[in-house]
């Protein structure tokens, strides 16, 4: 008896775990070269072999041309099995009758084109290239089978890219080591309580035995591919530092202060607010104090000491509060504090067949001022506040920053750490990403003058801490008082 021919088999470890995983939603990712695409193709081979003509799958990437390498690899594996490929339709028909399409998916409107479709497998290649989870989420409704075939969503990706933040929050953050099944409870009136499961399967370059054996220099190629953060992300699958983040100047060490710092802000400090509106997407409200130079920060420095981020806890999804609810929430959180003004999203001042959002807020005793929405100049001002004033000094001259955020403002911090640049307009933030807190910061900083007359001309030592910054500033203030400067 002739032994059966094995055309493909998964490598031991994560790739095998992917093929055998019964969980509905799987994110398989990490280092480059970890065998992610190969694993997805292998998953389809196993799935179509099991379910035959009842298997119906689709591979998505953000651009159709990005699928070229996947299609080329599928040819190597599928053609020897007798599968046929229709180039015009970019569709495989497997020997058992299963069908696999290759398509692009970019915006919500692309996902809407698949309403009414039925798939047993949906593959999202390079999920971190998608700025938002929204178009992918809309595909959940296509995963169904009239004959009970096992349906599932399979995503792959590396750290970095415009979607780093939502991928990290949804799959990696709950358990960075992976393999822990997470559950979402779904309660709909009239239906039984349901649960949907998802899991993260981490892949590492070392798991790909073929590439380690046949192309050992690939490790060196990755090690010399760019910045230290990029190398950690691509070589080790490190998700801790977003690659491609817009604000490379932002640092928790320099810009984030403990929440107790709020106790040092005097009641007499000038306070104001800034606000970015959102309903289906999150809104972002910030409370700011401006330093007059007498309470430990440079004159003109701005401190975000409180935030209200209107998210339901899911990536880039809002609370769906109407305007009166949000206005009341702002009033309650402001309390007895006196805000000089609230610089607000200019879209709130537009009338569309009725009162504007600004007018609705005013009726609810929250007065808004139209914010300056100049984007590139605004982002430059944010960066200037992060860096501090350089003026005509050499690049190694260092000053304390003019932007500080208390660590209780978690959503603003994570946004400034991870919001990506627009790949088509690298001078701008990617507006498809979760940029609401960044817009709030921009509105706030654009509403204030740039003050440069009282900045200590200190030069930092390597690894200087914030305590040392304050000490240097205190010495500078004392010198000013003694007319030594």
Image (cartoon, rainbow, N blue to C red):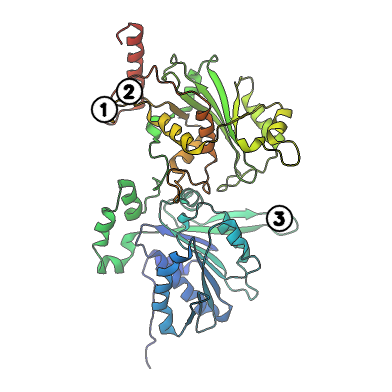
SS state under label 2? helix
User: Which residue is label 3 attached to?
Assistant: 188
As drawn, 469 above or below 413 = above
Q: Residue furthest bottom?
A: 1
**Spatial CA span between label 2 and label 1:** 10 Å
> Residue 344 or 424: which is nearer the viewer?
424
Q: Nearer the viewer, mark 1 or mark 3?
A: 1
> Residue 382 or 326: which is nearer the viewer?
382
Q: Quadrant of residue 108?
A: bottom right
Visible in this render: residue 364?
A: no
User: Which residue is label 1 attached to?
Assistant: 461
SS state under label 3? loop
User: Which residue is label 2 attached to?
Assistant: 468
Location of the C terminus by quadrant is top left
Q: Nearer the viewer, mark 3 or mark 2?
A: 2
**Spatial CA span between label 1 and label 3:** 59 Å
Q: Quadrant of residue 388?
A: top left
Q: Are marks 2 and 1 in contact (CB under 8 Å)?
A: yes
Tell whether 262 sits left or right of 470: right
Q: Earlier in the sequence, mark 1 or mark 3?
A: 3
What is the x, y in percent for residue 117?
Answer: 63, 69
Q: Nearer the viewer, mark 2 or mark 1?
A: 1
As drawn, 448 above or below 70 = above
Tell whether 246 sits left or right of 324: left
What is the x, y in percent for residue 225?
Answer: 29, 53
SS state under label 1? loop
Visible in this render: residue 401?
A: yes
């Amino acid at each position: 008896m002739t032994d059966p021919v094995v055309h493909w088999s998964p490598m031991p470890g994560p790739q095998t775990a992917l093929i055998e995983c019964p969980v509905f939603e799987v994110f398989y990712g990490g280092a480059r070269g970890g065998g992610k695409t190969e694993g997805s193709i292998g998953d389809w081979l196993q799935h179509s072999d099991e379910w035959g003509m009842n298997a119906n799958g689709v591979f998505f990437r953000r651009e159709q041309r990005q699928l070229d390498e996947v299609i080329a690899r599928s040819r190597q594996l599928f053609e020897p099995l007798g599968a046929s490929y229709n180039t015009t339709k970019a569709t495989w028909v497997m020997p058992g009758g299963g069908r696999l399409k290759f398509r692009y998916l970019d915006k919500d409107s692309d996902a809407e084109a698949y309403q009414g479709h039925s798939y047993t497998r949906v593959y999202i290649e390079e999920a971190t290239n998608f700025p938002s989870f929204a178009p992918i989420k809309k595909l959940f409704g296509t995963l169904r089978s009239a004959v009970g075939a096992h349906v599932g969503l399979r995503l792959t990706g590396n750290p970095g890219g415009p979607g780093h933040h939502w991928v990290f929050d949804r799959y990696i953050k709950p358990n960075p080591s992976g393999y822990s099944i997470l559950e979402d409870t779904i309660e709909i009136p009239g239906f039984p309580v349901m649960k949907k499961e998802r899991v993260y399967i981490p892949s590492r370059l070392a798991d790909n035995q073929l590439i380690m054996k046949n192309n050992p220099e690939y490790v060196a190629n990755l090690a010399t591919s760019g910045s230290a953060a990029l190398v950690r992300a691509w070589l080790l699958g490190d998700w801790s530092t977003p690659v491609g983040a817009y604000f490379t100047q932002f640092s928790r060490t320099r810009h984030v202060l403990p929440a107790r710092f709020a106790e040092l802000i005097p009641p007499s400090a000038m306070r104001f607010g800034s606000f970015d509106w959102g309903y289906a997407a999150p809104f972002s409200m910030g409370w700011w104090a401006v330093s007059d130079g007498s309470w430990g920060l440079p004159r003109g420095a701005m401190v975000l000491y409180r935030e209200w981020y209107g998210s339901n806890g899911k990536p880039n999804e809002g609370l769906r509060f109407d305007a009166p609810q949000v206005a009341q929430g702002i009033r309650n959180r402001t309390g007895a504090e006196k805000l000089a003004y609230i610089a607000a999203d200019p879209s709130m001042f537009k009338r569309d067949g009725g009162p504007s959002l600004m007018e609705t807020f005013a009726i609810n005793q929250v007065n808004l001022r139209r914010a300056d929405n100049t984007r590139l100049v605004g982002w430059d001002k944010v960066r200037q506040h992060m860096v501090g004033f350089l003026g005509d000094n050499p690049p190694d001259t260092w000053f304390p920053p003019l932007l500080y955020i208390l660590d209780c403002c978690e959503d603003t911090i994570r946004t400034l750490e991870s919001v990506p640049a627009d790949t088509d307009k690298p001078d701008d933030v990617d507006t498809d990403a979760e940029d609401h807190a960044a817009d709030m910061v921009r509105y706030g900083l654009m509403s204030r003058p740039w003050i440069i007359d009282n900045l200590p001309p200190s030069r930092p030592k390597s690894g200087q801490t914030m305590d040392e910054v304050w000490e240097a500033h205190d010495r500078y203030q004392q010198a000013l008082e003694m007319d030594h400067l």
